[in-house]
Amino acid sequence: MDACLGVTTCDKCGKPMNKGQNVLVVAEGVVTKSGDELDFQGSCVRYACHLNCWDGIEEADC
């Protein structure tokens, strides 16, 4: 899945997300095909943060 983010800062700490960093992205979408693999068509990214900032709680206003 490719995602383009309009806001390039971490939703948790507010610092910039840069190339090569591990991130976690929460996206909304639809499973378009299922089987051994799932095809997913995303409609929007709800939340993105540095992987080491993730504590299991989404804090974005949606």
Image: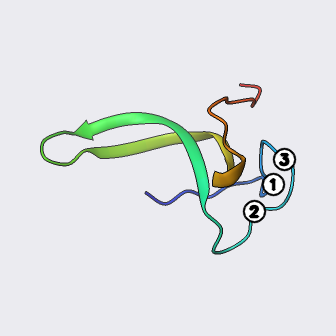
Packing grade of label 1 (10 A; few <14, some 14-19, many >=20) is: some
For the point 12% across and 42% down, the residue is 35
Residue 31 pos. (x, y %) = 31, 36
Q: Amino acid at mark 2?
A: Met
- Residue that label 3 marks: 13
Q: CA distance from mark 3 to mark 1?
A: 8 Å
Q: Position of residue 5 (x, y in %)?
A: 68, 55
Q: Which residue is mark 1?
A: 9
Residue at the limit of the structure toward the bottom, as seen here: 20
The relative height of residue 51 versus residue 32 in the rendered view (above or below) is below
Query: Is disc 3 surrounded by few (<14), some (14 to 19) or many (20+) residues within 10 Å?
Result: few
Label 1 sits on what residue type?
Answer: Thr
> In this figure, which residue is indicated by the disc labeled 2?
17
Disc number lying in front (3 or 1): 3
Q: Position of residue 59 (x, y in %)?
A: 75, 29
**Residue 18 higher or lower than 32, as above or below:** below
Asked if labels 1 and 3 touch by Cβ distance under 8 angstroms, the answer is no
Give the image location of residue 53, x and y in percent. 72, 47
